[in-house]
Amino acid sequence: MSTTSNSLSDKLQMTMRRLTGRGKLDEKDIEEMMREVRLSLLEADVNFKIVKSFTQSVKEQALGEKILKGLNPGQQVVKIVHDELKKVMGDEAEGIRFKINGMTTIMTIGLQGSGKTTAIGKMAVWLRKKEKKKVLMIAADVYRPAAIQQLQTIGKQVDIDVYQEGLIDARTIVKNGLKYASENKYDVVIVDTAGRLNIDEEMMQELKDVKEIVKPDEILLTVDAMMGQEAANVAKSFHDQIGATGAILTKMDGDTRGGAALSIREISNIPIKFSSAGEKMDSLEAFHPERMASRILGMGDMLTFIEQVTDNIDEDEAKNMMEKLMTDDFNYNDLMKQFKMIKRMGSMSKLLGFIPGLGAKLKQARTAIDDKQFDKMEVIIKSMTEEERKNPKLVDQSSKRRERIAKGSGTAVSDVNKLKEALETQKKMFKKMASMDEKELERLQKDPSSLMNQAPQPKKGKGKGKGGFRY
């Protein structure tokens, strides 16, 4: 599934790039583009009816007089495609509807394997962090014994309370759990309900009974994004019988899993409220159709990027690091702090995906970034003495030190040299930025990858004493 879903983003980006360079467009250009868009969407497992109405709507707007004679028709068509993608996914972001007074109840539903229990833990973390709520999770999925244990493990891991009574009737657990939550003044209660491999009558009846007891403010359906349009059919089936108020799309892989996102809203009429990618418990994001449309088209998603940075980085810490980078004081201790900041924000390749221009231009670099490299570099830095960390020149000028560091960290001397070069490249890139005038900075904003080309490359050593470091 991942190769086809990847093609949604890749192919649409290729089509849009070909368009933006055109001075004018005719009907044949638009027809050709619509054919490519149609194929991209179908390959990404987007429902056929949606593909048909989507391409029809874009074509109608693109054939308007304004576009054909516009100043930059290519860019105008890209904007139409972007706005149409946004519309299909629900136009505006829809958050949780909290009770004005009293306890908010959220019931979660979904098939086994959709990532429901993990999504509950992530949502509890999100509610505590973003909304400052005191959350209780109720373990009422009694058909999968491991589900209760899993929720308890997650609860311990993220320090959120779990109410459970083992494998007794789910209705009893829910009644008692709600009473407990009320007595202990929780703001939000999330109920984990029965998940099965297939939708069956018995399961649906139990869900209806639980719904009657909980009288939930939200019924959130977890859907595996890798299921493509099948995810939309599952969502519709649940919605028709239980009445979901929103969906959580799990297993979203950056900008590549757009197929399910494009099908769910339109087919099941359920708004997508959250999306989740990665294993980390803080990887749940509020779903913004506009931002998702931008990611699919390779326009990046600066707003999410900024949110991730501000959520995870202390302003003074960042300011201090920038000041050091602009001078010669930036050392291995600072580089290690930088790695830790990146880790707090999530994977490096995911972060680069948010930046406009980098999606397409640094596609290969993004996939080549292995986040385990950061761990390896950390181990190398930890094998240095405190003096070496503070004064990188000591490592630069001594092959014996580099050999000792490599031995101590269980790596090769070439790895220590790569780390040394990474430090130098960082310093040179930031010095280059510091000396830029307004025009150059403006150009950099439009094409961030140009900085990579401008950053002077460290010299390669050729024999003893050459190229700035000795072997």
Image (cartoon, rainbow, N blue to C red):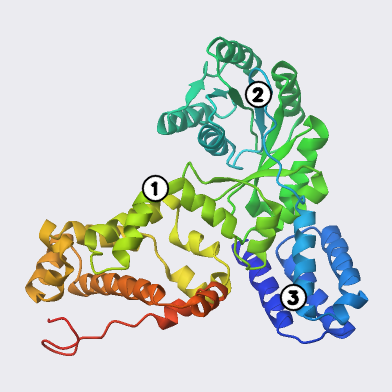
- Image quadrant in which you'd find residue 334: bottom left
Residue 312 appears at what percent x and percent y? 43, 47
Residue 191 appears at what percent x and percent y? 61, 25
Residue type pointed to by label 1: Asp
In the displayed structure, 151 sits above or below 400; it is: above
Nearer the observer: mark 3 or 1; the answer is 1
Residue 74 appears at what percent x and percent y? 76, 79
Mark before the other along the chain sequence, 3 or 1: 3
* Residue at image point 63% right, 67% down: 299
194 or 152: nearer the viewer: 152
- Kindly identify which residue carries mark 1: 314
* Residue at image point 52% right, 32% down: 128
- Image quadrant in which you'd find residue 179: top right
Q: Relative to residue 90, is residue 125 drawn left or right?
A: left
- Kindly identify which residue carries mark 3: 75
* Residue at image point 57% right, 39% down: 119
Q: Are marks 2 and 1 in contact (CB under 8 Å)?
A: no
Q: Which mark is residue 105?
A: 2
